[in-house]
Image (tube, coloured by chain):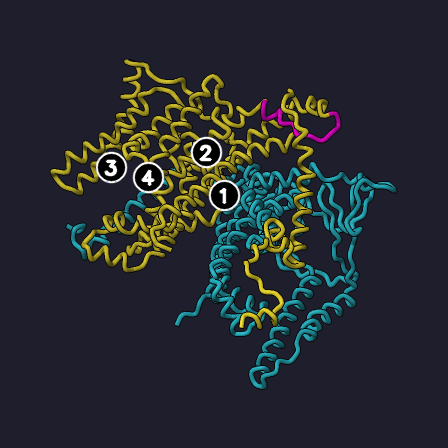
Chain colours: A cyan, B yellow
Amino acid sequence: MLLYDQRYRSITIQIFALFLLMLGAAWLIDNVISNMRLLGRSFSFNFLWQSAGYDINQRPIAYDSTMSHGRAALVGFLNTVILAILGCIFATVLGVLAGVLRLSSNWIVSRLITVYVEIFRNIPTLIWILIFGAVMAESMPAPSAFRGDDPASSMIFDAIAITNRGVYIPSILFTTDLGALQLGPVAPSLNWLLIFAILIGSVFANRALIAHATRTQNATGIRPKTWWKSILIFLVPLAVVKLSLGVYLDYPELRGFNFAGGTHLRNSFLAMWLGLSFYTGAFIAEIVRGGILAITKGQTEAAFALGLQPGKTMRLVILPQALRVIIPPLISQYLNLTKNTSLGLAVGYMDLRSTLGGITINQTGRELEGMFLLMLTYLAISLTISALMNVYNSRIKLKER
Amino acid sequence: MSDTHAQTVSYVRETMLAPQDPPRSQTGAVKWVHENLFSGWINTGLTLISLLVIFWLVSGISPWLLNSVWRAGSLSECRAILDGTSGACFAVIVDRWHQLLFGFYPPALYWRPVLALLLLFVALAPVLFTGLPRRMLAFSALYPFIGYHLIWGGSLWFPVTALMGFGVGALAYLLMRKLNNLAAIFAAILAPVLWWVFAAGPLDSALYSIMPLGLDFVRSDRIGGFLISMIVGVSAISLSLPLGILLALGRQSDMVFIKTVCVVFIEFIRGVPLITLLLFASLLLNFFLPPGTSFDLILRVIIMLTFFASAYMAEVIRGGLAALPKGQYEAADALGLDYWKAQRLIIMPQALKISIPGIVNTFIGMFKDTTLLVFIAILEPLALANAIRADTNWNGIYWELFIFIGALFFIFCFGMSRYSMYLERKLKTDHR
């Protein structure tokens, strides 16, 4: 019998499993088709081009309620990406800081950080998001508290106003506008693209400078001073841009019942950003702590014995080894944070799940198509992050010979 | 000689000095404070900043917490009692704790979920602590049926007939084993399924009409609060471990097809947020079932959460499998063990031990994720907090509810993480 013969056993089992799987899939698809026929519906994505009819309060690209559901989904997607990127950055800063401080010999600091980590790790992220939302909406002063000669609240450095309607920060504006680049659905500002390009250029120039210094050191034994050249490489192009484009800060100021000018960070965004960052930061703190503890003390001592200074010991010996332990779990935390951005609906943050997976599905009744697109997009985001991070991970991996 | 010596040296000590205490700065509290808090200016700065943070937190929260009101009928009554001062209104918890714990479960029947919870601890005890007699595991195996009957109620014969399905399976296996081993396995799988689909229902109603035993039936939509978090969490956790082990083994398998299916399943589940899977369960699952069928939302959610947790579990266990030295697999082969025996006796005990922290973390994550049920209109604690706020009496109350719910979650999750530490210490067989 095929099952008892070593040569065919594995292939028999697999064909049997394939058969079962196809049978199951056929059953499911048949069910979907008959259900759709019963409801008199078809499977089509035409709804994406119909007018959406709802507003989105946070708009990274131009959008109004007459635009299509597809455009609304794109706005939601960009909001998700913005939140994920900012959240990952802030969570990393918090996590690294907390992870290092928890190892501090200072008793009070390490206890304080332990309390932070345990409290945030053991209470669901959704509760934290709601708590931060409530802190913003309930405990912050109303804009009217900033009025009068002797106001109850005042702006921080005359630039940042924290109110119960959100936080107002100065925004960067230009007197000379180079216009926008038309890229189909999105139109990024040329000014920002220029600044971005210059920054990337500076990074590459700086890298070339350091490589040159290393070559000189290898050839002559003397390392040329590079720090002032590095500063110049970064500052001079930016100063030229500032002068030529006329960069200035637009400060928020109280007008009427509310603040005007500057950038308005809405409560929904802040609740999501702070909630996710503090929650994920607690996990990252544990990862960082574990990574540092995984490096034995002998490594530090060996580095000192070789005559390396503490800073160089950290940079050249400890960090490269600790990063190898830290990066894989860090990637999964970034993925978790990105997936948790889908909780935005709880505080009214209009991310992809609230636009495409929420209002659009409710309005058009296209659950099947909407959910399909939603899952596909999240899957694409997750796979992209893990692919990028895996590339990075393989670059810093121990090169075994 | 001694005389000259006595003349040249004016004084010789002949007795030992009594030992002196170390300098005051090198002992006790002063030394500890100096070493741990003020050993350098960075350290001093950190200490001062921490003290400032602690002072800020305590001075902000403690007046509010100490000045709390425990007896009031509504938030406005609370505010009247507080008379303009800042204070917590824990009266809402006194008024509504039963809702946060049980949802809209009939108050007269609260003893049933409480008993179910107590029995859960009895059932868990032999699983968690190996020192207890092994015979208690029989109760653990029966617990799902007892727990179901206690919480939902209905006919007593329903769980009994469901349980009989396993007896039917065992019987079929024993009868068919004489014929053929493979046929016996098929029979053992097929017979209970046939029993549950065709025989269990009629038998249940027949027995119930003869002997109407049972508890009052409670509808699923009345169950809520922490009760639902516990039901969903515990069932999904206990179901996801075996499924996760199977998925992990499938992913390590040599069979290309099986491996592909497992990888696609795991990566898909891990790649989408849980909330989309829950929406799938509540909105779309009916599309994939024969027209007209529909089953309980709680059951659908448990299935989805099980899938979700098992994908993560599979990755954790795969890590444990990968950490085992290859020699263990080869040793099992050398002993002539077949695949399943090798897994059961050699590989899994070690792999699971390595992955305990990860498994417990998955459990904790899973339990915390039950809060997401609020999005699909299941009455978990956060949904009830919204319901309480919707009441005019308690409109505008936030912190007290968050503190109560957060504290309950904290107790369970923190307890689980401590248990995992205990287990790690206990199972550590290497001598380091």
* Mark 1 residue element: helix
In which chain is the residue bearing label 2? A
Residue depicted at 15% across the width and 34% down the height: B175
Distance between the Cα atoms at labels 1 and 4?
45 Å
Question: In the visual, does B41 lie left or right of B366?
Answer: right
In the picture of the structure, the residue carrying the numbered disc 2 is: A39
Q: Position of residue A400 (x, y in %)?
A: 40, 70
Q: Hey, what amino acid is under mark 1?
A: Met
Is disc 4 in the same subunit as disc 3?
yes
Distance (Cα) linking label 2 and label 4: 55 Å
Determine the residue positioned at 66% across, 78% down: A225
Say if the magenta span includes residue B202.
no
Q: Say whether mark 4 and mark 1 are on the same chain.
A: no
Residue marked by disc 3: B189
Q: How busy is the neighbourhood of tag 4: few (under 14 within 10 Å), some, or many (20 plus)?
A: few
| Badge 1: chain ID | A
Q: Write the start and end of the magenta stretch as one range.
A: B83-94
Q: CA distance from mark 2 to mark 1?
A: 18 Å
Write down the residue under mark 1: A371
In the rendered picture of this protein, how many numbered marks are placed on residues? Answer: 4
State the SS at label 2: helix
The CA distance from mark 4 to mark 3 is 31 Å
